[in-house]
Image (spheres, rainbow, N blue to C red):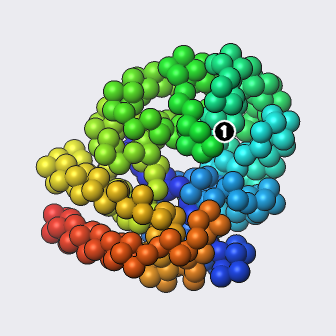
Amino acid sequence: MMKKDVWPVMLTPYDDTGSIDMDSLARLVDWYEENGVGGLFAVCQSSEMFYLSLRERCLLAGSIKKRAHVPVIASGHVSVSREDQLEEIKQIADTGVDAVILITNRLACDHETPEVWKENLDWLLARIDPAVQLGFYECPVPYKRLISDEELAFTASTGRFRFMKDTCCDLETLKRRAAILEGSGMLLYNANVSTLLDSVIAGCAGFSGVMANFHPDLYVWMLENYEKYPEQARDLQCLLTMCSMIERQAYPVNAKFHLKEMGIFRSCYARSRAQAELSATFIDEVCQMERLIGRARERIKELT
C-alpha cells in the first residue's frame, strides 16, 4: 500500500523589519523534518506568496531545496497574464525544486468559462519544459476555483502532473477524485482536517494543510498508524479537527507565535496581516491547544 504522508504548507519567517529571516527558515525546515514530514510545499498561500517579490519567491524555493532532505515543491505564479505566469514558473523551476505547483484560479478569472481555463493550461504546457514536474493547488485566494472531474482527468492524462493539493473540503468529492487519479501517478493531498482520515482511507495520499505548522508529528502518526490503532487514530482525528478551528484566529500570525515560542522563529511578523490581530485571547487559545496536544502525545507514547 502507498505510504501516506504529510506535506506542510510552509510559513515565511521575517525579522521585525519585514525582511526574510534566513536563519529562522533553516530552523523551520529542520523542525518539519524532525517531525517526520514526507515533503515540503514552499511558496504557497501560507508562505504569503502574494506579498513576496519574484526574487524573494525564488530565494525561498531555492534555499529550502538546498536545506531539505525531503522533496520540495513550490508555487509562486501569482500574476494575471499567462506570459508573466510562464516567466514565474520558469524561474521557480530553475531553483531546482522537485515540482512546480500551478494555481487553479490563475488559469481563468472567476467569470470565465472552463474552455478558457483549459486553453490557458494548454498554452502553458506547450511552453513549460516537459522535464519540469507539475502539480495543482486549489488556492482560495483571490477566489477558490475547484477543478472539475473532467479537468482533473485531463490533467492526470498528460503524465506531467504529480501532486494535487485539494481544498474542496468535501469527502464525497475527495473519494471521487481519488478514484479518478488512481494509478495515474498524480497524488491527491487533502488540505482539510475534518475529512482527512476518511479521505486517506478512501485513497488520498496524505495531508497538506496549515495545521502541519502547529503539530505535524500528530498528523504523521495518524497517517502511519490508523490501520494498526484504528480507535486511537479516530480519537486523534476528532481532536485535530477541533484544534484546526484555530486556523480562523489570525493565521498565520498565530502559527508564527507558536513557532516563536518554540525558539524556531524570532518574530511573529507577517506581511499578510498585522501582528496586532493576535489578541491576548488568541494567544491563550494557542496555549490551551498545546496543552491538549501535549496530552495526545503522551497517550501515543504509551501505545508505542
Number of numbered callouts drawn: 1
Q: Which quadrant is home to the N terminus?
A: top left
| Residue 273 against residue 79 in the figure, above or below | below
Q: Is residue 70 above or below residue 82?
A: below
Asked whether the viewer can see residue 301, the reply is no
Q: Quadrant of residue 274?
A: bottom right
Residue in front for this viewpoint, 22 or 210? 210
Residue 296 is left or right of residue 52, and the answer is left
Location of residue 7 in the rendering, given as x and y in whole percent from the top left corner: 49, 52
Measuring 66% from the left and 19% from the top, which residue is drawn there?
113
Could you say which is closer to the camera, residue 1 or residue 8? Answer: 8
The answer to whether 74 appears left or right of 279 in the picture is right
Q: Position of residue 191 (x, y in %)?
A: 44, 45
Q: Amino acid at mark 1?
A: Leu
Q: Quadrant of the C terminus?
A: bottom left
Q: Report which residue position mark 1 lands on.
A: 102
Residue in view at x 56 percent, y 57 percent: 46
Specify few, some or many for label 1: CA neighbours under 10 Å numbering under 14, 14-19, or 20 or more: many
Q: Which element type, helix, strand or loop, lies under badge 1?
A: strand
Question: In the image shown, does 179 or 145 lie closer to the viewer?
Answer: 145
x, y (%) of residue 58?
76, 58
Q: Is residue 287 above or below residue 165?
A: below
Residue for point 65% across, 82% down:
16
Q: Position of residue 88 (x, y in %)?
A: 80, 46
Whether residue 55 appears in this view of the structure is yes
Residue visible at 85% across and 36% down?
83
